[in-house]
Structure formats: structure tokens, C-alpha cells
Amino acid sequence: MTKTLYIVRHGQTDLNKRGIVQGRGMNTDLNDEGRKQAGQFFAAYKQVPFDKIYISELKRTQQSIQQFIDQGIPFEKLPGLDELAWGIHEGQPATTENKAAFLQIMRDWLDGKLDCKFEGGESPNEVKARQIEALKVIMSHPEEETVLICMHGRAMRLLLCLLTERPLTEMDTFPHQNLVLYKVTYDGDKYEIVDFNNAEHLKNS
């Protein structure tokens, strides 16, 4: 079985614009810029013969690729594709204290403390566990040769580690912005990133 995965992060929301963490618990809508980004991505990739679309349970992912769904491409929501839950920090304004807490937990993760999490939140290992389940669903359909996946920034970094068999401590080696594309191929044995952090489609007005 071979498969090609087009993995994108959702478009911009107002909280993205304001630098406020959303996470799994914030079900926000795209803003005007996010809707523009969605249109740019659709214009660039509408000719790709997607067999299936997989999205998270958060509406910003569906809004980001709604134009593909409107073409009649079947889609499925998988909770395993949801963003990492940041717990008590979700939706909170960026304060000096919050920034310090985030810097500390990032350091913990890079140091291999992958069970660390904020109160009410999730750890990278917990997200990986549900991503493994989502991936089982996605890869259980050999007839779906070309798949579009729309998800979230931190979760996408963790998924790319999972696919490329890299430790989760390397998650920050996968940069991203709103509606950026990672294209990954599967040859029946291993996954390979063939298009890395592609934002060319966003340059078209």
C-alpha cells in the first residue's frame, strides 16, 4: 500500500493573531485572514484528486478546507487530530508569568520529560497515544491513496515526529504557520516528508 498525505495546519483565528494559546478546549472560528488563507490553499490544490479528508473535531479545521468538502470529497472527524490541550492556559492573555510557564514546559519537553503537562492539559505522550489511534484509522483504508489532513500546530509537530520515527523531543524541528503544508508519502514501509513547511500558496494574493 502506498499513500500520500497532505497535512496542513488550520487557517488563522483571532486568538492566533493576538498570540493567545487556543489548544483543544478552544473551539474558535477562522478570521478574515484565515478564510483568505483557506481560499489560497484551495486555489493551489483544488486539482489534487483527494480520496478522503480527515480533520480534528474543532471547527477551525473544517472551515479551513470546507471548499474541498463542498466538492463532494468525503470527510471524517478524528479526535486524535485535535490540538494538544493546554489546560488552564487556554484562552488566557499572554502575561510574563504565562510566558515563563510555557518556556519552562518547552524546556521540560526538550529534556525528554514528555509526561509533563499543564493543569487540565495534555502531555506530548498523551497526544501521541491518540494520534496513533487516528493514524490507524487513516492507514486502514488502502483505497484512499491521496488524503488531506487538517489539524493544529503543536499536534502537527508531534504527528510529524511520529511519522518520521523521530523522538518527540525533536518536535520543534518542524516549523509551521497558519495553513502551511507538509506533504508526506508512505511507500508501504516508511513515511517520508517530500514537501517541508510549504507556504508558496500563501504568497498569491
Image (spheres, rainbow, N blue to C red):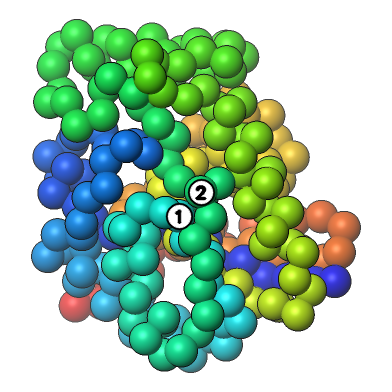
Q: Is residue 118 above or below residue 185?
A: above
**x, y percent for residue 129:** 65, 35
The residue that appears at 56% across and 38% down in the rendered structure is 158
- How far apart are the alpha carbons under marks 1 and 2? 6 Å
Name the foreground residue: 148 vs 29.
29
The residue where tag 2 is placed is 79
The residue that appears at 26% across and 22% down in the rendered structure is 89
Q: Secondary structure at mark 2?
A: helix
Does residue 40 appear left or right of residue 159 in this picture? Answer: left
Q: Is residue 142 above or below residue 56?
A: below
The residue that appears at 41% across and 48% down in the rendered structure is 152
Mark 2 and mark 1 in contact (Cβ < 8 Å)? yes
Type of the residue with mark 1: Ser
Does residue 96 appear left or right of residue 113 in this picture? Answer: left
Task: Choose top left, top right, bottom left or bottom right for residue 143.
Answer: bottom right
Name the foreground residue: 82 vs 171.
82
Q: Secondary structure at mark 1?
A: loop
Type of the residue with mark 2: Pro
**x, y percent for residue 80:** 55, 46
Q: Is residue 82 above or below residue 101?
A: below
The residue where tag 1 is placed is 56
Q: For the residue carrying disc 1, how many other residues have a C-alpha within 10 Å: few (<14), some (14-19), or many (20+)?
A: many
Q: Quadrant of the C terminus?
A: bottom left
**x, y percent for residue 200:** 37, 69
User: Can you see residue 103?
Assistant: no
